[in-house]
Image: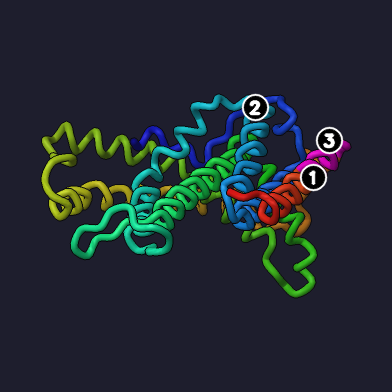
Amino acid sequence: MIKDITIGQFFPGNSVVHRLDPRIKLLLTVIYIVMLFMAKNFSALGAGVIFLLVSFLLSGIPVNMMFKSIKPIIPIILFTGVLNLFFISSGDILVQWKFIRITTGGVHTMLFMAARIVLLICGTALLTYTTSPITLTDAIERIFSPLKIIKFPAHEIAMMMTIALRFIPTLIEETDKIMSAQKARGADLESGNLIKRAKALIPILIPLFVSAFRRAEDLALAMECRCYHGGDGRTRLKQLKTAPRDYVATVIAVLFLVAVILLNRFAPI
């Protein structure tokens, strides 16, 4: 399970999606999220599915990476699905036993929310799959740069967000090593009830936190030794420039958003 977490990883490539301006990719991601939360039925949500599949095909990222990004959040999907299934009482009653009642409205809401969460995770993961941390930092800083007038620390926030994304795969790898070491020492991490499993995580979490703080200290020391002092006066090797493909991608995303609005109004399901 740990090795299947792909959040924050970057897969180099030369596809159309890789070559898009990172600022445009951030804008497309925001439009995609709005698209999902505006969808009120499965027909409108289907437009989001098509947009996601086309984006994955154009990016050249293997489709199995989409399933790997979903795998770690399966418990969250199941938890939210069960809550919606048993606490939504609208529609016709399908099953009723004592205080348990399952209705058509509960089943519909469960499936709809599960699909929305899956699409949300896959779409946001595609951003990190096709954008390197450095270019993502530059894009976030450029987007927030107008706020520097009011002393908003755009560069510092962009740097913190990118470092957090960059260290997710590192911490996942560190967690896997710690778990393997504890298992080699005879630790049982998989059997027992929920309380025992939670207690078994303590020998993993403590060295993980120690390692994370040590890495943070080493990174701060390295940045200080290189005279890092923020974004003032810094130059960039690659300047961000928009191209015609960026405008085409934006127009296509807006058209999909309009399609979602129309499907909400006219689609029956």
State the SS at label 3. helix
Circles 1 and 2, Cβ within 8 Å, touching? The answer is no
For the record, the magenta segment spans: 243-252
Place residue 228 in its image quadrant. bottom right
Residue 250 is tagged as: 1
* Residue 263 percent across, percent down from the top left: 68, 50
Residue closest to the eye, 224 or 37: 37
* Residue 253 percent across, percent down from the top left: 75, 44
Q: Type of residue at label 2?
A: Leu
State the SS at label 2. helix
Q: Residue furthest front?
A: 92
Q: Which residue is mark 2?
A: 57
Name the residue located 52 percent from the left edge and 45 percent from the top edge.
Answer: 121
Name the residue located 11 percent from the left edge and 45 percent from the top edge.
Answer: 192
Label 3 neighbour load within 10 Å: few <14, some 14-19, many 20+: some
Q: Which residue is mark 3?
A: 245
State the SS at label 1. helix
Q: Type of residue at label 3?
A: Arg
